[in-house]
Amino acid sequence: MADKNFRVLISQRRLEARIGQLGREISRDYRGRKPVLVGVLRGAFVFLADLLRNITVPAEVDFISVGSYGDAKVSSGVVRLLQDLNTNIRGRHVILVEDIVDTGVTLSYLTHNLRTRRPRSLEICTLLDKHEKRKVHVPLKYVGFRIPDKFVVGYGLDYAQQHRNIPYISWVRED
Ligand code: IMP
């Protein structure tokens, strides 16, 4: 992806190192348990795949899909469930795996939704935290990187469904 408009914010090397640490942390915290990793589609699938390979406890995987962004860079603020889990999470240890937390609206919706199903525990693991933009508080247990308020793509994150294949986190130069 040798486009001069794409700038490296977080390199592949840094992603790999940090995701290794997160995997070790989760493996330690969930020793003796079988957590269910719930990936938020579509953005989290790349992160979840790498995170899973760094987890040494027997983890299950499922996905949930929500929509809030459409194809724009600005959230509509409306979240709707597009595709539900196949797993019954009642009594399970659930780790919600997200690509990026911006306003917090999506995760707030998801945590409220999943809590009604009575999981034994529910924690959030996000690769990126755009903390300056937070409108709704959501407790983040595992955070890969805190990033400034820039629109980023790559490593699963898109702009208008494009650029998910860039292997690093990139920001788009807008000049
Ligand atoms: P929130 O509801 O405002 O926290 O937004 C979370 C969702 O918005 C994420 O799951 C992403 O799909 C999307 N999003 C927020 N910021 C970015 C970004 O910089 N690049 C790509 N997607 C983003």
Image (cartoon, rainbow, N blue to C red):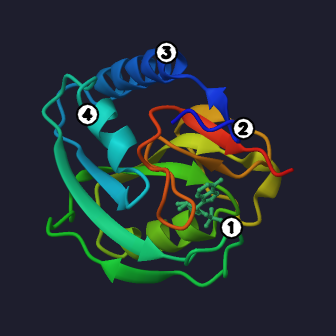
Q: The disc labelled 3 sits on which kind of residue? A: Arg
Q: CA distance from mark 2 to mark 1?
A: 16 Å
The residue beneath circle 2 is: 147
- Other-residue count near label 4 (Cα within 10 Å), few / some / many at <14 / 14–19 / ≥20: some
The residue beneath circle 4 is: 52
Nearest to N terminus: mark 3 or mark 2? 3
Q: Is residue 114 left or right of residue 152?
A: left
- Other-residue count near label 3 (Cα within 10 Å), few / some / many at <14 / 14–19 / ≥20: few
Viewer-closest of 88 and 121: 88
The residue beneath circle 3 is: 13
Nearest to N terminus: mark 2 or mark 1? 1
Q: The disc labelled 4 sits on which kind of residue? A: Leu
Task: Name the mark on residue 73.
Answer: 1
Asked if the residue at tag 3 contacts the one at tag 4, i.e. Cβ–Cβ closer than 8 Å, the answer is no
Picture layout, residue 21 above or below residue 140: above
Q: Is residue 30 left or right of residue 150?
A: left
Q: CA distance from mark 3 to mark 2?
A: 17 Å
Instruction: Give the residue at x 77% y 65%.
Output: 135
Front disc: 4 or 3: 3
Asked if the residue at tag 1 contacts the one at tag 2, i.e. Cβ–Cβ closer than 8 Å, the answer is no
In the rendering, at what x and y percent does residue 88 appear?
15, 67
Nearest to N terminus: mark 3 or mark 1? 3
Asked if the residue at tag 2 contacts the one at tag 3, i.e. Cβ–Cβ closer than 8 Å, the answer is no
Instruction: Give the residue at x 69% y 36%.
Output: 4
In the rendering, at what x and y percent does residue 155 appear?
46, 40
Q: CA distance from mark 3 to mark 1?
A: 27 Å
Q: CA distance from mark 4 to mark 1?
A: 29 Å
Viewer-closest of 3 and 162: 3
Ligand 1 within 8 Å of disc 1? The answer is yes
Nearest to N terminus: mark 4 or mark 1? 4
